[in-house]
Amino acid sequence: MTPIKTFNIFMIMSLVTIQIVFANVPIVKQYSYKFYGVVFGIVIDKNGDLHNLRIVKVLDPACKGCDLSDMKVSQEFFDNVQQHVRTKGYKPEIENGIAKEFYTYFIYDPMRPERIDLDPNNESNTTKK
């Protein structure tokens, strides 16, 4: 064999060995935590049932209250909030016999729309579950 062929075979074998070795090494994904405050308007009827749930505004706390109302919140997050409100047992606010809207907020992480219990001040929320 010529030195060039030997070198080429050596290089190919080295690359194959590297691929085999690194094929089983887990890749650590970099995860960027970006939280938003989503303000919801809630109407509970006199029977205690959810009558209406709507997104009033989306806020970016890093932007000192910038209103991001045009931002799309995932349907999964909205559905999870809706389920939470239905099971939470909020009391209706009735004024002159009419159910009145009240407001609350949930923290939204677009990378984890299944979570509605996030607290951006709690370091355990910066660990992906």
Image (cartoon, rainbow, N blue to C red):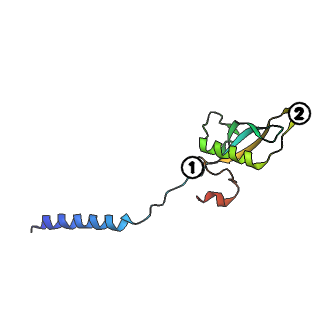
Q: Is residue 61 left or right of residue 18?
A: right
- For the residue pair 46 and 3, the one nearer the viewer reads as 46
Outermost residue, left side: 1
- For the residue pair 11 and 28, the one nearer the viewer reads as 28
Vertical side of 45 occupied by 25: above or below:
below
Determine which of the numbered discs, if any, sits on residue 111 in the image.
1
Q: In which quarter of the image is residue 24?
A: bottom left
Outermost residue, front side: 47
Q: Residue 19 appears at what percent x and percent y?
A: 32, 64
* Image quadrant occupied by the C terminus: bottom right
Query: Is residue 124 visible in the rendered structure shown here?
Result: yes
Labels 1 and 2 touching (C-beta < 8 A): no
Taking the spot 63% from the left edge, 45% from the top edge, the residue there is 77
Q: What residue type is disc 2 on? A: Glu
- Please tell me how crowded label 1 is: few (under 14), some (14-19), or many (20+) other residues with Cα within 10 Å: some
Q: In which quarter of the image is residue 86?
A: top right
Q: How many labels does the image show?
A: 2
Taking the spot 12% from the left edge, 67% from the top edge, the residue there is 3
Taking the spot 66% from the left edge, 34% from the top edge, the residue there is 69
Q: In which quarter of the image is residue 1?
A: bottom left
| Tag 1 secondary structure | loop
Determine which of the numbered discs, if any, sits on residue 95 in the image.
2
Q: Residue 89 appears at what percent x and percent y?
A: 79, 48
Q: In this view, does 34 lie to the left or right of 16?
A: right
Q: Residue 50 appears at what percent x and percent y?
A: 75, 40
Q: Which of marks 1 and 2 is in front?
A: 2
Determine which of the numbered discs, if any, sits on residue 25 in the image.
none
Taking the spot 60% from the left edge, 52% from the top edge, the residue there is 33
Q: What residue type is disc 1 on? A: Met
